[in-house]
Image (cartoon, rainbow, N blue to C red):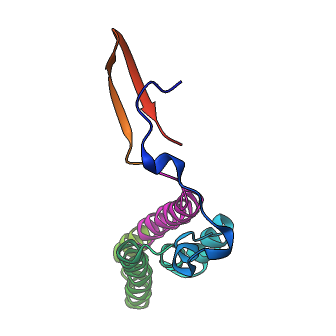
Amino acid sequence: MYYGRKMESDSVHIDSARVDSAAIRQVRIRSPKGAMWRSLLFPGWGQLYNGRYIKSIIIGGTEAAFIYGIYIQEKRRQEAKDMGYEDGEKFYLKDRKKFTWWLTGTLIYSALDAYIDAQLMNFDVSEDLSAGVSGGLLFIRINF
């Protein structure tokens, strides 16, 4: 029940024949599963698909850095093995595995982030969240 005065914007009627194409473009429907799979296939693609460009660069760069680290540590491990340094080989193998785990965690985070972001893409956040006291009663008004 609403005890405030009725504002003019509460009674807006839209003629369905005169809908602006810019208003239609504002409502973007994204597939959460599509965003998740894009994020798993190519670093940062799921975030790019959702329109989160800076997040895409950060996640894509992080995944690329881990992939490069895995490549470098494997190359160093192979060189240590060829030279006969067992301790060096074990060190680089352990380091490569560490990079692999970090990459796995980043991939899982990226996929979940893309999925949740696409799911909440059209979540309506109204600016009219108000609270107050009226007639001795505390009220909270949230418009959906």
Q: Quadrant of the C terminus?
A: top right
- Regarding residue 89, the answer to whether it shows in the image is no
Residue 98 shows in the view: yes
Residue at position x 38%, y 70% in the image: 95
Q: Position of residue 65 (x, y in %)?
A: 37, 80
**Which residue extends farthest top?**
136
Whether residue 79 appears in magenta in the rendering, the answer is no
Q: Is residue 28 above or below residue 130?
A: below
Q: Nearer the viewer, residue 37 or 34?
A: 34
Residue at 50% from the left image edge and 61% from the top image edge: 113
In the image, residue 101 lies in the stretch drawn in magenta = yes
Highlighted range, magenta = 96-124
Q: Is 107 situated left or right of 82 in this image?
A: right
Vertical order, 115 against 135 (above or below): below
Magenta: main secondary structure: helix
Name the residue located 45 percent from the left edge and 50 percent from the top edge: 9
Left or right of residue 11, residue 54 in this image = left
Quadrant the N terminus occupies: top right
Residue 60, position as x, y percentages in the image:
42, 78
Reply above or below: 125 against 57: above
Against 110, is 81 above or below? below
Q: Quadrant of residue 29?
A: bottom right
Position of residue 142 measured from the top left corner of the image (x, y, whole percent)? 46, 35
Residue, x 51% and y 52% (percent of image)? 124
Count all numbered tags in the image, as a single digit.
0
**Location of residue 46 in the rendering, given as x and y in whole percent from the top left corner:** 54, 74
Residue 16 found in image quarter: bottom right
